[in-house]
Amino acid sequence: MDPVLARFASQTRQAPEMGRTLLARKWLALQLCGGVHALYAQVGDDYALVQHRLRGDGLSANLVSTATPWSRQELAAFVEMCAAGLAEAGPVEAAHGQPALQAFCERVWPAPVEQEVWEPYHLDRADHWRKRAYFLATQRAGPLYAETVAAIHDAGHPPEECRRRAHRDAASDLYTRIVAHKPEAPDPLATAAVLRDLNLGDAKVEAAPAEEELIKDPMTDDAAEVAGPAPVAVVFAAAAGSPALIADRTPAMQAYAQAALISATFCNTKLAKQMLLLQLGQSLSVESNLHADVIARNQLVGGVVLPTPLEREALTTLAAGAADLPALEKQSDAVQALYTLCEPEGAPPTVAQFLCKAVEVYGTGPADADAELWKRQHLKRFPQVDASVLACIKAL
């Protein structure tokens, strides 16, 4: 939070004695509701001067509220401001003069019929700030991004819990509900009422980091003062059993072989690799010689549609006994993100589990609106499967 506020204070030349609370309110007022004067006027009286200084600073373009997503550092600062500044806020039901916030919460979190009137005052005391944070997120110009909801939902929970499927599914369901009840247009007065509850104390923020410490944010391609993620050690658990051949063709393999005019004597292992490459969006072409080593001599390679995806059991058999993937580019950001997705409760996955996760993520094309939140987040950052994953499949 402090690096974002310090940079904002430096670029807008705010008074050194200004406390963290007022500085955070000003920053948020420019980030929400399109940065309109109607909102900023509720927290400060220097709107024209601040806008002039921001427009004159090329590095501060991302500080003005737009329809683009926050950078990773800005999103983390927003969540930290809400968690710390709204921690003392009471239940939304008891908030005075905030009908828009109350109406939003009633639609997204309808109270059970049997709930007593006094219960909201005693339940989830530590989470009253989250509902206000979700409401503020809907007041940002443009669409509500799933990453914003996930960041608020993850705050305060251990990383191991945030990686669990149940936790991610809960965030995805919550995002769907919030989007369904998102206000049609931002409300500056309703937003200002929530910002007035923000209290971060009067302490001063630390000095802004040096410009050379700023790095590129891979999610937004904007300059942001964020630290690169710590590299993950890509190791695989030992697989039970020994390498096995696909002796009999599965129903999906039989259907594909018939459609591609592949003979019954063709190697089943190469046949399975063909299907995996097609499933991952690769095109088979003898002329390009890209995948010629897995193509039969007289088979059809053009215009053949994969009738049914290769079964998971066939892929598991194909990777059985493999203890590592030498062709895998383990330092690639896409590979490390994919590896993190398939870690069950922090335990290293097997080679088969890793490849199955790659097929699960990339095998059905772009994620649709009903796809899990974790999958849409990954595909947004890495829309194409890493080339080294394809090399690993061909090397099995």
Image (spheres, rainbow, N blue to C red):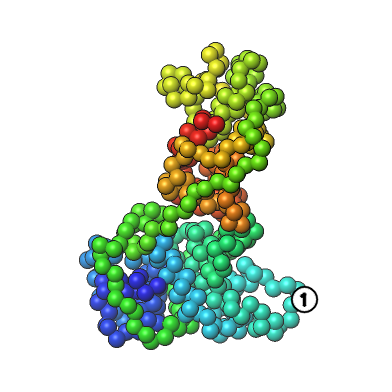
**The N terminus - image quarter:** bottom left
The picture places residue 236, in percent across and down from the top left corner, at 55, 46
Q: Residue at x 66, y 83 (%)?
A: 122
Q: Quadrant of residue 224?
A: bottom left
Residue 176, visible in the rendered structure: no
Q: Residue at x 44, y 70 (%)?
A: 78
Q: Residue at x 42, y 61 (%)?
A: 72
The residue that disc 1 covers is 114
- Examine the rendered structure and indicate whether residue 369 appears above or below residue 191: above
- Residue at the farthest top position: 298
- Residue at the farthest left position: 56
- Examine the rendered structure and indicate whether residue 204 appears above or below residue 341: below
Q: Quadrant of residue 387?
A: top left
Q: Residues within 10 Å of mark 1 (few under 14, many from 20)?
A: few
Secondary structure at badge 1 equals: loop
- Examine the rendered structure and indicate whether residue 383 appears above or below residue 302: below
At label 1, the amino acid type is: Glu
Q: Residue at x 62, y 32 (%)?
A: 243
The picture places residue 151, in percent across and down from the top left corner, at 51, 64
**The C terminus - image quarter:** top right
84 or 234, which lies in front? 234
Relative horizontal placement of residue 35, taking residue 248 as reference (left or right): left
The picture places residue 294, in percent across and down from the top left corner, at 52, 23
The picture places residue 304, in percent across and down from the top left corner, at 56, 23
- Residue at the farthest right position: 114
Residue 76, visible in the rendered structure: yes
Relative horizontal placement of residue 368, taking residue 384 as reference (left or right): right
